[in-house]
Image (cartoon, rainbow, N blue to C red):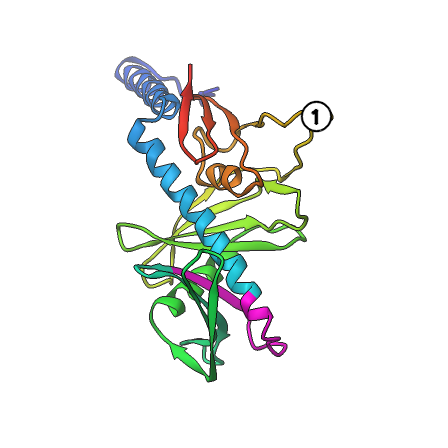
Amino acid sequence: MLRLSQHRLEGENMRILLNLVVALVLCSLLVLAQQSRPLSDSELAAITSRGRFLAEYDFASWHATDAVLALKPPKGAVSRYIARKTDTGWVVAFGRFNEAKDAFLIVYEAMQGSSPKEFSVKTYDPPQKDTEYFYIAAKEIQISLENSHLEKRPYNTYVLPSDSGQFYVYVLPAQTAADVYPLGGDTRFLVSADGSQIVETRPLHRTILEVKHSAPAGKKPAGGFHTHVLTDTPEDSDVFHVIRQTPPLPEFIGTKSGNYTVQTDGTIKRVK
């Protein structure tokens, strides 16, 4: 509501005010229309691609961590892991910042073998000092965590290079039970190429849902369903949620721009 002051608006001043109000209304309607339009096929494909990347990152980190834990690393040697997809497979670095925080000290480097689950581990003693990719990624994770509103539970982080040279960093609640899959309470950050500044913060879902699929005896669950409040589109982590389940289950998503299903391979379809 516009409340006028005691000064009377007359003639040209009134016309200026009315024109301004009309312009603001039209702009608001335009923004809402833009937010409510259905996503294009290319936009949906980009979400699918990022979601599949998250699932690959998670899978590689899981099996690389198992390989490193088998070596029984000393307490405090590792504070963070960072995965990187290369032309020859995934490489996962385990380490910590040095005291000056101007380098990332790699203590273990796990390299993917001939199968997605197979990782060989190289130990560095003394730790290998990295000031390039893994160091920058560690900075990006650190600044993202510092700007996240976290509950008292474990979280996983994922780093995805973007075409612009900047990086996406995802902070997602970690799975803590074998048959329960958390969905929500997650954020995607766009971080500068040097890891020093957050360019964009995108909360993906508000509430954390602990998803455990069940069905009557002799039946199989058909899939899941949720609606979006914070955003108007399917999200990268929706695709990740579908793919990481065992077995993968489709997810129906309701948004203001329309309804979508994420299929078991991560492909997103509009529901008419």
Does the image show residue 146?
no
Residue 137: quarter of image: bottom left
Left or right, residue 178 beside residue 133: right
Q: Quadrant of the C terminus?
A: top left
x%, y% of residue 167? 36, 54
Q: Label 1: few (<14), some or many (≥20) within 10 Å?
A: few
Q: Which residue is drawn at the image coordinates 31% and 26% (left, top)?
A: 40
User: 135 or 191, which is in the foreground?
Assistant: 135
Label 1 sits on what residue type?
Answer: Gly
As rendered, which of 224 and 194 lies closer to the eye?
A: 224
Residue, disc 1? 218
Image x and y of residue 144, in percent = 47, 56
- Residue drawn at (49%, 81%) of the image: 99
262 w.r.t. 52: above or below: above
Q: Position of residue 14 (x, y in %)?
A: 32, 15
Q: Is residue 48 left or right of residue 78?
A: left
Is residue 82 in the magenta section?
yes
Please tell me whether residue 249 belongs to the stretch shown in magenta. no
Query: Which picture quadrant has residue 92?
Result: bottom left
In magenta, the rendered stretch is 67-84
| Residue 193 on image: x %, y % | 31, 59
Q: Secondary structure at mark 1?
A: loop
Q: Does residue 39 appear in this view? A: yes
